[in-house]
Amino acid sequence: MKKKIAIRIIVAASIIVTGLVAYTLMSNKGVQYQTETANKGNLSVTVMATGYIQPVEEIEVGTQVSGVIEKIYADYNSHVKKGQLLAELDKLTLQEKLNQATAQLSKAQSELNLANRQYDRVKQLYESKAATEVALEEAINRKEQAEMALKDAKANLSQAKVNLSYAYIYSPIDGVVLKRNVNIGQTVAAMFSTPTFFTIAEDLTKMQVEADVDEADLGQVKLNQHVTFTVDAYPGETFEGTVSQIRISPKVTNNVVTYTVIVNAPNPDEKLFPGMTASIRINIESEEGIIVPMEALSGGKTLRVKSNGKIEERSIQTGVSDGVSIIARSGVREGEEVIIAEVVKK
């Protein structure tokens, strides 16, 4: 009996000593929590890319005939109307070819008239048995050849007129001249390709961004998604647009594959110039709600909240995430402190 009492005393003493030691240790150390405040806001998932500002419609204007530039009526930045005269080639050579074609047509018509008269005579003689069948065939042949020569002469005259008209360079659209590639006195040759005189943008109030999007991000990009972008010319100013086209032709540069995404960019003030570099953000998804840091989550669906001096573990429903923060649709209120880390203080 005395032995049992002694054992109980020893156990009780051990418990007391252990409690005293634990109390001593806890008094010398504690847990310090790092927290962040859960705030309400809008969280967006974006794809970033770089591109260049370009006109929606850009047309190269040239000529189909060779010659010397005689007059130029438009220059860089000129606003032009459809049908407006932009330049003229020297017309002496073209006019001479037209004169020659006109003369050739008159000659061909005279030869046909002669061939017709000869045919009529031979035919009458043949019908009266005064000419042979061979003579008639020769008359028919001369007539047919003269008809073909006249047809060719008419075609040559028509082409000469067209070539002369090509000496006048007109604007095919309303727009603004971006480039002028010729000077007065310059000789242009149209033997193998059409020389470009001017490059005209149809409407600078409607621009687009041609952006290169990495293949890893392309699957998230959809038509009509909202886009914001900036250009170096206007620091701090943000422009807006929408995704209008995703081109399936890839670009490969240093083993990096990208795809061209076209962004419509309204430019009513004409601040955006062709060729400007644009840094774009494509808004993939967004949600408004309570935003908490991703590092606060445990197991993806729970987190700890410091509330009224206590630590509570809560289950939450999650929404949009950008990889750094996430929307908590339930389980956390605005202004509460969520624990992101804990440090044992010695």
Image (spheres, helix red, strand yellow):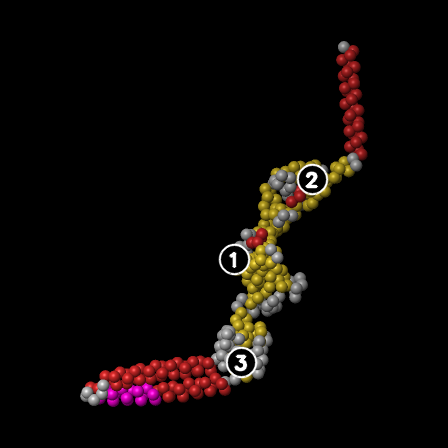
Mark 2 secondary-structure assignment: strand
Disc 2 packing (10 Å; few <14; some 14–19; many ≥20):
some
Q: What stretch is highlighted in magenta?
A: 110-125
Give, as a three-letter code, the residue at label 1.
Ile
* Distance between the alpha carbons at the discs numbered 3 and 2: 78 Å
Q: Which of marks 1 and 3 is nearer the N terminus?
A: 3
- The residue sitting at the top extreme is 1
Characterize the magenta stretch by its predominant secondary structure: helix
* Distance between the alpha carbons at the discs numbered 1 and 2: 51 Å
Residue 123 found in image quarter? bottom left
**Residue beneath label 3, please?**
87
**Residue at 71% from the left image edge and 41% from the top image edge:** 341
Drawn side of residue 295 relative to residue 134, left or right: right
Disc 3 packing (10 Å; few <14; some 14–19; many ≥20):
many
Foreground residue, 227 or 123?
123
Foreground tag (1 vs 2): 1
Give, as a three-letter code, the residue at label 2.
Lys
Residue 304 found in image quarter? top right
Q: Can residue 227 be seen in this view?
A: no
Q: Which of marks 3 and 2 is nearer the N terminus?
A: 3
Drawn side of residue 111 relative to residue 295, left or right: left
Question: Residue 202 location, x and y as percent?
Answer: 53, 71
Question: Residue 286 location, x and y as percent?
Answer: 58, 51
- Taking 3 as reference, is 320 above or below it? below
Foreground residue, 323 or 169?
169
Give, as a three-letter code, the residue at label 3.
Ala
Disc 1 packing (10 Å; few <14; some 14–19; many ≥20):
few
Q: Which of marks 1 and 2 is nearer the N terminus?
A: 1
Asked if residue 115 lies in the magenta stretch, the reply is yes
**Residue beneath label 2, please?**
306
